[in-house]
Image (cartoon, helix red, strand yellow):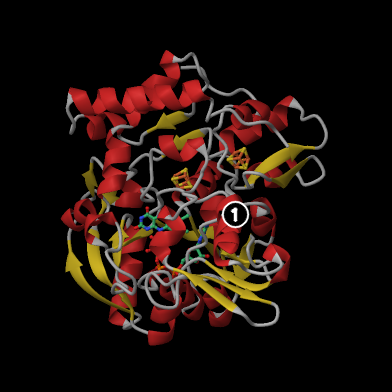
Amino acid sequence: MNHPRSLREIVENGLCVGCGLCQSIAGGDRVEMTMVDPPGRLRPRIKTPLDDQTEQAILAGCPGALIDEPVVPGRHGADVKVDASFGPWHRVWKGHASDPEIHHMASSGGALTALGIFLLETNKVDFVLHVAASKEKPMRTERHLSFDRAQVLEGAGSRYGPSSPLIDFTEQLDKGKPFAVIGKPCDISGVHNMRKVDPRVDELVKYTMAFSCGTFADLQCSRWMLDRQGVPGGEDNLSLFRYRGYGCPGPTRAVTKDGQVFDEPYLEFWYGPHGWTHQFRCKICPDPTGEMTDISISDAWPGGGPTEEEWGGSCLFISRTLKGDALMQEAIDADVVTVDETDIAALHECQPHQAVKKDGMNARLQAIADEGGIGPVFRNVRLDEAAAQRDTEFHEQNRAGTRERIRKGVNRESLP
Ligand SMILES: Cc1cc2nc3c(=O)[nH]c(=O)nc-3n(C[C@H](O)[C@H](O)[C@H](O)COP(=O)(O)OP(=O)(O)OC[C@H]3O[C@@H](n4cnc5c(N)ncnc54)[C@H](O)[C@@H]3O)c2cc1C
Ligand code: SF4
Ligand code: SF4
């Protein structure tokens, strides 16, 4: 398979996830994240031609183009277990934040919010880099820095639209302060790619955490929700837009500037009359469950989805590194989280769609090669082991499905 040789080729071949890291690497005067709307995706705009050194630095950091997640004894420990579909793990728990306010406001169990606050309140980090709703345009999602509990809580909940949490990642390193990063698995892969490029990442990024991620919706899907619910004045008239939280999974909620509230049930947002659209790169995501993090979190819905609104509010916690396992133990001892230990079978029960994706990845990548396309570099993500769990028919279906998508051109994008 051919691989991208420039930022332009990353975007044009549908490999960009919109993380924003290329803007941080090149500088905002040369690359600027821009909303391409419709469909509503954040993509880099090249403002001035890039020199070869910058192109190479972007190719080395970009998680759309490169994923490399080796299991390293020093980081993971000699006794780490490795599941073919879900990656390295020490222990798995089911539970939630002990604090009822966090539990209620958060996406599912409040695991990420509770652990983020715990890191700050025990002085393990000075700040947490994650995302939150824009205050000016609440349907948009922005990079968010949290230095205290209230700020971490502002970011609680799933943001199912586009976001660029790494837009100023190297500027955060320039501060010389220890911090944690919470994001999608691909955001965290960008952080990990940077470890090889910038030694300050090892020194300053103390913890990484991600949630299990099945893709996010283009911004137009949020606009369709406003249309379906008859929200007057559209996006410009919003004082709040929340996708999830305030009771698991909680409705998608739009509140107008004069206080009118419009709710749409979780399942209707995803599977309602308009359906939803998303980027091609998520179809070839080799790590939907955050395998390279210290701790990753997923919903604990048997079968992979909620069966009714207001369903529970539990997470699965997976400690993946020695550091992540120690942090979990500390959080349990401090009663920050209320959990019961289970094991990796719970991931297979609650995230079957992610196993399907991972196990079919080799076949999907093969389809890109079949079509003479340009695809990503995926190293050390255990794709052969994952594929070996499925039969020939499964792989043929994955290969044919991806070929079909490519022939329809869903992987073709233009630079803004
Ligand atoms: C795009 C997306 C896809 C998802 N897909 C799945 C899935 O396939 N399977 C599944 O089990 N669960 C999925 N989830 C839900 C996710 O698993 C839950 O958020 C998770 O259970 C964590 O719950 P929590 O209560 O600990 O999170 P919270 O305590 O509410 O914390 C959520 C944290 O994630 C950060 N965050 C939210 N949205 C984004 C974003 N778009 N980009 C970067 N950071 C963000 C917030 O800043 C916050 O720090 C998805 C969530 C999102 C945002
Ligand atoms: S994935 Fe991130 S680093 Fe790569 S091109 Fe897109 S925004 Fe830039
Ligand atoms: S599915 Fe994978 S590539 Fe897509 S947003 Fe989620 S982590 Fe990123």
Residue 313 location (% of width, % of height): 32, 73
Depth order, front residue of 120/73: 120
Viewed as shown, does residue 31 lie left or right of 310? right
Residue 209 visible in the picture: no
Residue 69 location (% of width, % of height): 40, 40
Residue 356 location (% of width, % of height): 27, 40
Depth order, front residue of 124/254: 254
For disc 1, the marked residue is 163
Q: Residue 60's image quarter?
A: top right
> Which residue is found at the position 31% from the left and 46% from the top?
354
> Which residue is found at the position 37% from the left and 20% from the top?
366
- In the displayed structure, would residue 66 be above or below residue 287? above
Q: Quadrant of ligand 2?
A: top right
Please, which residue is most extreme toward the bottom here?
100
Depth order, front residue of 77/145: 145
Q: Quadrant of the C terminus?
A: top right
Residue 386 visible in the picture: yes
> Which residue is found at the position 64% from the left and 82% from the top?
259
